[in-house]
């Protein structure tokens, strides 16, 4: 009777030890997964920082390019207006009627006789 109780207690202790090993193994596995997840999170955070910097640089470059294009377009508009004015003056026979172009620096930037 005492022997049987001792065997039952020993069997129960072995089961508990097995359960404890499984819990320990599970905890170690969970810790490894958590560590790997933490590493992936750090890598993702670094990549996000790089992407943010890249987007910021693209945005700055795009703004700078847009300003350049707007400036160039405004300069082209000014040149076109000057050429149109010079053409109107030339078609009307010039400012003094002598056929000279005398508008906004003339064509090519200098006033010159048209013919």
Image (tube, rainbow, N blue to C red):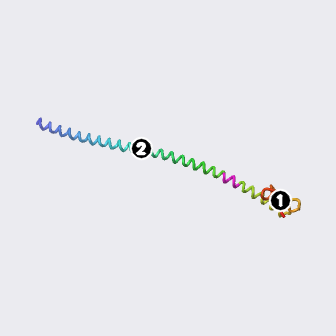
Which residue lies under the disc numbered 2? Answer: 39
Which residue lies under the disc numbered 1? Answer: 112
- Residue 76: x, y in percent? 72, 56
Check contact, mark 2 vs mark 1: CB within 8 A: no
**Eye-nearest disc, 2 or 1:** 1
Figure quadrant of residue 34? top left
Relative to 55, 88 lies left or right = right
Taking the spot 31% from the left edge, 43% from the top edge, the residue there is 26
Relative to 101, 34 lies left or right = left
Front residue (pair 13, 98): 98
Taking the spot 41% from the left edge, 44% from the top edge, the residue there is 39
Figure quadrant of residue 97? bottom right
Taking the spot 80% from the left edge, 59% from the top edge, the residue there is 86
Q: Which residues are magenta?
A: 68-73
Relative to 54, 99 lies left or right = right
Figure quadrant of residue 15? top left
- Residue 27: x, y in percent? 32, 41
Question: The N terminus appears in which quarter of the rendering?
Answer: top left
């Amino acid at each position: 009777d005492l022997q049987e109780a001792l065997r039952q207690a020993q069997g129960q202790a072995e089961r508990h030890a097995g359960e404890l090993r499984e819990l320990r193994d599970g905890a170690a596995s969970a810790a490894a997964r958590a560590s790997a997840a933490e590493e992936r999170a750090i890598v993702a955070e670094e990549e996000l920082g790089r992407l943010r910097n890249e987007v910021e640089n693209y945005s700055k470059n795009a703004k700078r390019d847009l300003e350049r294009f707007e400036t160039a377009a405004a300069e082209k508009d000014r040149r076109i207006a000057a050429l149109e004015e010079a053409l109107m003056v030339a078609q009307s026979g010039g400012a003094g009627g002598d056929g000279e172009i005398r508008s906004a620096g003339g064509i090519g930037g200098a006033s010159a006789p048209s013919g």
